[in-house]
Amino acid sequence: MKIRQNARHFASRKALEMPGVRSVARYGLVRLHTRVFTGKADPDRADERETHLDAFFDATMDAYLEALRAGYSEAEAREITHLQANFDFYNHGWTEMMEIPADELDAHYERYADFFETWGITIDDPLGEFEPEGGVPEAPSTPAKLDDPEHPHAEGGFADDVYVETEDGDLVVGGREEPEDVDVSRAVGVDDEAVDE
């Protein structure tokens, strides 16, 4: 998968790990992701998906933190959560929201199979053990879109590794090293102007 990575991503990671700001950062990241992906949704369907996406993305914050604890890099941990979201989008037939083509789901799953299997995550069950008690609010599916999927926001050909686009537009395989001088005040949710995905 091709993702972006900049100082704000590292700041958000640090904020999620810090008492006192973690809840603010978490809320900000959830709302940011919901806003980004409802923006990719069919406009007639975006509102009905919002509550589902809020709860789903909130659960993926726990997956992100567990991936970091397991030794995955920031880029890999974030990619894991984006894959969980893409599995969910696929299951609902929300193909217009997907970041990768449907025919690459298995290849992406296999790259992180150790993590996914540890936590009971499958393509059919994208949250696995991160599913909150009581589940995630459901939203209407559009299964007919799976018959001839359109992926206007998907980029194929990046299934063999995590590809990171830096602030300078360079494409780096595996992501960047975390800088030493991470400024938590720049984290999404902490900084009201933080808008990076």
Image (spheres, rainbow, N blue to C red):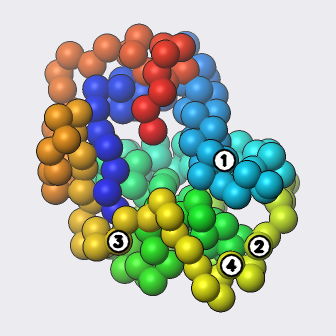
User: Which residue is labeled 1 in the image?
Assistant: 38
Are there few (<14), some (14-19), or many (20+) residues within 10 Å of tag 1? some
Q: CA distance from mark 4 to mark 3?
A: 18 Å
Name the kind of residue labelled 1 in the image: Thr
Report which quarter residue 154 is drawn in: bottom left
Which type of secondary structure does the marked residue at label 4 adopt? Answer: helix
Name the kind of residue labelled 3 in the image: Gly
At x 35%, y 71%, the residue is 156
Which mark, by number, is residue 145? 4
Q: CA distance from mark 1 to mark 4?
A: 17 Å
Question: Are circles 4 and 3 on residues that touch, CB within 8 Å?
Answer: no
Q: Is residue 193 above or below residue 77?
A: above
Give residue 73's position: percent from left, percent from top: 27, 47
Are there few (<14), some (14-19), or many (20+) residues within 10 Å of tag 4? some
Question: Are circles 2 and 4 on residues that touch, CB within 8 Å?
Answer: yes
User: Which residue is labeled 3 in the image?
Assistant: 156
Name the kind of residue labelled 4 in the image: Lys
Q: CA distance from mark 2 to mark 4?
A: 6 Å
Q: Is residue 116 left or right of residue 5?
A: right
Give residue 178's position: percent from left, percent from top: 21, 33
Between discs 1 and 4, the one toward the N terminus: 1
Give residue 158's position: percent from left, percent from top: 28, 68
Name the kind of residue labelled 2 in the image: Thr
